[in-house]
Amino acid sequence: MTLRVGVIGTGAIGKDHARRITKTLAGAKVVAVTDVNADNANDCVKDLNLDAKICANGHDVINSAEVDAVIVTSWGPSHEEFVLAAIAAGKPVFCEKPLATTADGCNRIVQAEVAYGKKLVQVGFMRRYDTGYRALKAVVDNNKIGEPLMIHCAHRNPCVGENYKTEMAITDTAIHELDVLRWLTNDDYISAQVLMPKKSKHALSHLSDPQIVLLETSTGIRIDVEVFVNAKYGYDIQCEIVGETGIAKLPDPSSIIMRSEEKLSTEILNDWKDRFIDSYDIELQEWINSTLKGEVNGPTAWDGYAASVAADACVKAQKGGIVPITMGACPALYN
Ligand code: NAP
């Protein structure tokens, strides 16, 4: 059986997901697209040579009888509306992060899904599909380094645009760590603090950069995440878990080791798309496979909610102090 997919939002990542479904992955085809920017929708269909209809809006995609499942890749503030509509229509929905722009919005989605009585929503936290992070998780889950005690992370971008604001260090950047570290540790956060080190002269005047996010989990694991989005030298993701009996570190992407001009060197990537390109493929293929079986096996609406609650606390902590993180009980649907 082929999963017939409708894509809402055919900008950068929406078009890229349509491309991978059409050209790289198996088991699905794109049958409908929409975008408020008509040129984007037209270009997507034309450039990828899709046999897909262009709908007037996201609701027409969701309610189309030809669409079995929906991908939401429009801009963040529209996600909640489309995910709720997909749940109301009883259709599986893959939503790029953020699930909603506020924790309350994510909670409304959780409540709607719980009321529906079956999981339909998967959130696009693709790091869970990265080979290195999966190896790290296997080390933790198989108790190879004992209980995790501390985790040191860095999320560095070469530069960011003028529209990038201080809170986006959390909501756009550290949000991936907030999800993946919770998944790695099988633990929830209880508090957040954000430190502002000496500011880089390469950061625009309105932006605090770098920042250090400090998290504490319910079992007492202490986590530090350096977010540095004008790091200049490349796109670099680091994660080191210190356990009771050993240390496990995320591998760097494989690269040729060069001996040349009296130097031993390896390349550092510059673009986040290259760093996680394989994980996007794995993420979407696994989503297609599980959706065809009527299951959700990836990050759930509850995971989207948890990341959003933690992000809200971190944004508040950017103004100072240690901010508690509380989520309430996880509904049985997600256990
Ligand atoms: P983008 O290039 O701006 O594409 C978004 C597209 O959606 C644009 O064409 C936009 O039109 C359109 N759109 C906005 N509101 C819409 C609506 N109500 N209905 C239909 N189309 C609508 O942005 P992007 O980089 O692809 O990002 C899209 C989402 O994916 C964001 O939430 C982003 O955070 C997420 N994302 C996640 C990852 C990841 O690593 N998991 C990576 C990239 C992006 P206009 O151009 O007219 O605004």
Image: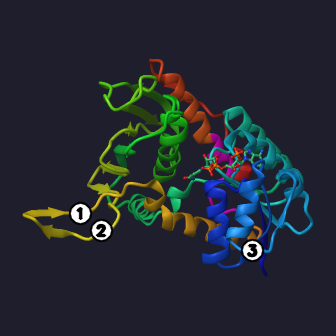
x, y percentage for residue 18?
68, 66
Judge left or right: residue 188 versus residue 287.
left
Residue kind at label 2, given as amino acid type: Ser
Distance CA(mark 3)–CA(mark 1)? 38 Å
* Mark closer to the chain start, 2 or 1: 2
Residue 93 visible in this rendered orientation of the protein: no
Which residue lies under the disc numbered 2? 255
- Estimate how packed mark 1 is, as few (under 14), some (14 to 19) or many (20 or more) residues with alpha carbons within 10 Å: few
Q: Is residue 230 magenta?
A: no
Residue kind at label 1, given as amino acid type: Thr
- Magenta stretch? 296-305
Which residue lies under the disc numbered 1? 266
Which residue is at 38% across, 62% downward? Answer: 139
Which secondary structure, mark 2?
A: loop
* Mark closer to the chain start, 3 or 2: 3
Distance CA(mark 3)–CA(mark 2)? 33 Å
| Quarter of the view holding residue 143 | bottom left
Q: Are marks 2 and 1 in contact (CB under 8 Å)?
A: yes
Which residue lies under the disc numbered 3? 29
* Mark closer to the chain start, 3 or 1: 3
Q: Is 153 situated above or below 7?
A: above
Nearer to the camera, 311 or 196:
196
Judge left or right: residue 309 versus residue 195.
right
